[in-house]
Image: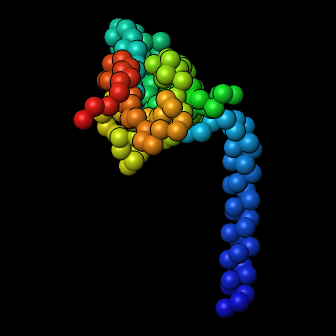
Amino acid sequence: MHRFALWGSVVLTASLLAGSLPAAEDIERLPVTVTFIVSGGLWEEPGDIGDGNAQASGSTQGQAAAARRGYYKLVSVRQPDRTAKVYLQQIAATDAGPELVNSVELEEFTELKPYVTDIRPEDSTGITRQPGMFATVYLKTVPTAVQPEAWTVLIDELGDIRVERETN
């Protein structure tokens, strides 16, 4: 029994080392000022339809291009004055892996000079079938405040972004 346990730990260690080295390098590139990252939502761009005549003749020029799709990331980055900036990234899911399409600073948060305490997605299942994204950013505008304010980031199916204070 001891021999099987030893063999199992050798196999486990080898597989962890093989799989963790690239991940360890990747995580070291993440700035230490990043305090929160939330991924979620769905976006999709239709592929090019092309020329129907070219498709009929067998030409590859007219064949439909694959639709691009991906997800969003909300990232909170701590600033030297301890406040945070919040960025929205659009990530394409490609065969070669995730690819950054666009990154924008959400000025609505920058104007507040917030102390971000948390970011949460609407859904933690990781699966969404509807285009868009919904997440809640918890922040304080005064660091000694007891309760944080909740702000929502909503991206609709057209890609329009709304940032607003949550009201109950």
Q: Position of residue 66 (x, y in %)?
A: 44, 24
In this view, the residue in front, 146 or 44, is 146
Query: Whole-percent x and y of residue 46?
Result: 37, 20
> How many marks on residues?
0
Q: Is residue 119 left or right of residue 80?
A: left
Placement of 85 over or under 138, stated as above or below: above
Q: Position of residue 87 (x, y in %)?
A: 53, 25
In this view, the residue farthest toward the left is 168
Determine which quarter of the picture holds residue 161. top left
Which of the 4 quarters of the picture holds residue 101?
top right
Residue drawn 37% across the image and 30% down it: 152
Q: Is residue 17 left or right of residue 91?
A: right
Q: Is residue 32 visible?
A: yes
Q: Quadrant of the N terminus?
A: bottom right
Q: Picture coordinates of residue 44 (x, y %)?
A: 39, 25
- At 68% across and 83% down in the image, what residue appears? 5
Residue at (74% x, 65% y) in the render:
14
Q: Where does the C terminus fall, quadrant-wise?
A: top left
On screen, residue 68 above or below 144: above
Residue at the extreme bottom = 1
